[in-house]
Image: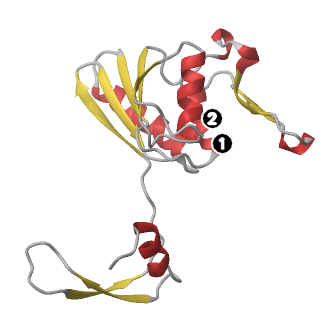
């Protein structure tokens, strides 16, 4: 009680397989109850989606993890397979996506970009720092585009880091319309 979510999570972390004893208070119950949980590694599915209506797909990416690009490709194939006609509109939801692995984010951006039509020498993102080792360039790879039609990207103040890179690369290359509120600003 009295802890932030981050502080509470820090106290609950521990070695996989060990037990944690929690005392919980739930709305509607008059007194606290206890629960013993076994700690495990949690694998979060970062890509989810569905068809909203014929020809319109919705995909949510909650964070950029090692398998995000592969999961995105698989989901797009599944959604397209459900359709008798090609998907004509895609809503890519990056709201409250805090980022994650830079390579996963750039792979996702690359999934929607055609390097032949890109501006800025096919660059998805680059960094330029005060020291040479902080300089980096990530360019789009050819033949990785999984979707070519209308694209809308949703962002909000919780969209940060990799989510901002994806949204920015798609916007800069006139590949998507960005909707929502101002992003985190990282």
Residue 73 coordinates in the image, percent (x, y) = 48, 35
Task: Report which quarter residue 107 is drawn in.
Answer: top right
Task: Report which quarter residue 123 is drawn in.
Answer: top right
In the image, residue 1 sits, relative to residue 85, either above or below, namely: below
Q: Secondary structure at mark 1?
A: helix
Mark 2, residue position: 106
Q: Residue at x 49, y 75 (%)?
A: 10
> Dot 1, how many residues are within 10 Å of its Cα: few (below 14), some (14-19), or many (20+)?
some
Residue 32 coordinates in the image, percent (x, y) = 18, 86
| Numbered label attached to residue 86 | none
Residue 154 coordinates in the image, percent (x, y) = 40, 30
- Distance, label 1 to label 2, CA atoms, is 5 Å
Mark 1, residue position: 103
Q: Quadrant of the N terminus?
A: bottom left
Q: Residue at x 55, y 50 (%)?
A: 65
Q: State whether residue 66 appears in this view.
A: yes
Q: Residue at x 39, y 87 (%)?
A: 20
In the image, residue 185 sits, relative to residue 16, either above or below, namely: above
For this view, does 169 lie left or right of residue 141? left
Please state which of residues 3 and 172 is positioned toward the viewer in this rendering.
Answer: 3
Please state which of residues 62 and 12 is positioned toward the viewer in this rendering.
Answer: 12
Give the residue furthest to the top. 117
Q: Secondary structure at mark 2?
A: helix
Q: Are marks 1 and 2 in contact (CB under 8 Å)?
A: yes
- Colour mode? secondary structure
């Amino acid at each position: 009680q009295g802890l932030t979510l981050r502080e509470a999570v820090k106290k609950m972390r521990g070695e996989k397989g060990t037990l944690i004893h929690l005392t919980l208070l739930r709305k509607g119950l008059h007194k606290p109850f206890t629960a013993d949980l076994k700690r495990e590694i949690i694998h979060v599915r970062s890509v989810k989606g569905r068809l909203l209506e014929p020809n319109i797909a919705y995909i949510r990416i909650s964070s950029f993890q090692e398998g995000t690009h592969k999961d995105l490709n698989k989901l797009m194939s599944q959604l397209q397979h459900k359709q008798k006609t090609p998907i004509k509109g895609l809503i890519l939801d990056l709201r409250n996506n805090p980022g994650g692995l830079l390579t996963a984010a750039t792979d996702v951006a690359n999934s929607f970009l055609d390097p032949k039509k890109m501006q800025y020498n096919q660059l998805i993102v680059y960094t330029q720092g005060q020291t040479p080792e902080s300089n980096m360039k990530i360019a789009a790879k050819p033949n990785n585009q999984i979707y070519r039609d209308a694209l809308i990207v949703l962002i909000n103040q919780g969209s940060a880091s990799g989510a901002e890179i994806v949204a920015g690369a798609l916007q800069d290359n006139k590949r998507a319309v960005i909707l929502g509120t101002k992003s985190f600003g990282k």
